[in-house]
Amino acid sequence: MSSAELAVAQPESEDALEVNSVSVRFGGVAALSNVSLRVHAGVVTGLIGPNGAGKTTLFNVVSGLQRPNHGEVYIDGRDVTRLGPHRRARLGLARTFQRLELFGTLSALDNVRVGLEARHRESDVDELDTAEKLLERVGVHARRDTQVGSLPTGTARLVELARALSISPKVLLLDEPCSGLDDSESEALGALLRGLAQEGRSILLVEHDTDLVLKICDHIYVLDFGEIIASGSPEVIRADPAVQAAYLGHLDAPETGPLS
């Protein structure tokens, strides 16, 4: 697929996504406490933290599935805090899920076409051709006619990514996209994400593979017990004592640069 077909316009604001002082409580439990982050246009931003840190809750707030008790969410400078998921999608927000949200009885190709139909209902987009190219781009074109329910989890996650790309998103939220992928597949996905960012998209990535996050992300936020405990470049995060404590020294891995 050509860059003209998949690229999106650069937003007017450098912050394609802004989360401002967001708090979420479930009864007496604070899932998120005064969380703020910014995702710039054209970069990959990482969000890491231990299980239960609040990462998926934050994704739900950003995508409109969870209303915060306090704080705001902005897309391209527009306050979308009170908008539902569909309206945010129309503004260019797409996401994948930790638990796959696909139509298991449909083929990989038809799953992507569903996304294209929802986005391009009144346009002259060639849905079949575009869906084929999207599956080719994420590396699963050979399985295009396979029912998603019979695909390995890692492959199905790539189908979900292709469907997310079908709406030509400005902001892309990815929740554990490498789960089920082997090392070579994860590296290929990392290169793909870098390429998508270079086209002007803003990517916020939640991923337990911290080695990959450190390798491909331009900026990283670390969430622990619902609070941001550190943010900065991979080098800053690697050296941060609070992050080292939260990850029990896991970030002592050899330093690696971004994928080309």
Image (cartoon, rainbow, N blue to C red):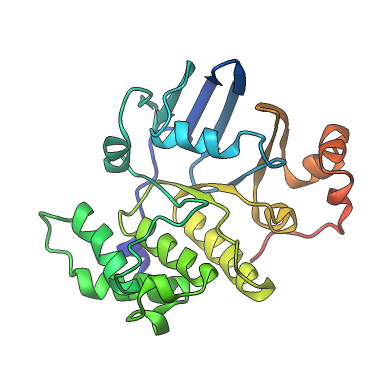
Camera-nearest residue between 205 and 219: 205
Residue 225, above or below 146? above
Residue sitting at 61 percent across and 33 percent down? 54
Q: Is residue 193 visible?
A: yes
Which residue appears farthest toward the bottom when viewing the image? 142
Camera-nearest residue between 33 and 45: 33
Residue 183, above or below 243? below
Residue sitting at 87 percent across and 36 percent down? 245
Q: Is residue 110 left or right of residue 41?
A: left
Residue 128, above or below 123? below
Q: Is residue 55 left or right of residue 83?
A: right
Residue sitting at 82 percent across and 45 percent down? 238
Camera-nearest residue between 246 and 256: 246
Q: Is residue 223 left or right of residue 18?
A: right
Quarter in which the N terminus is drawn: bottom left
Quarter in which the C terminus is drawn: bottom right
Residue sitting at 46 percent across and 21 percent down? 68
Q: Is residue 1 visible?
A: no
Q: Quadrant of residue 113?
A: bottom left
> Looking at the picture, how far across and down is residue 36, in whole percent?
58, 25
> Looking at the picture, how far across and down is residue 226, in whole percent?
65, 27
> Looking at the picture, how far across and down is residue 156, in whole percent?
46, 68
Q: How many marks?
A: 0
> Looking at the picture, how far across and down is residue 163, in whole percent?
35, 61
Which residue appears farthest toward the front when viewing the image? 27
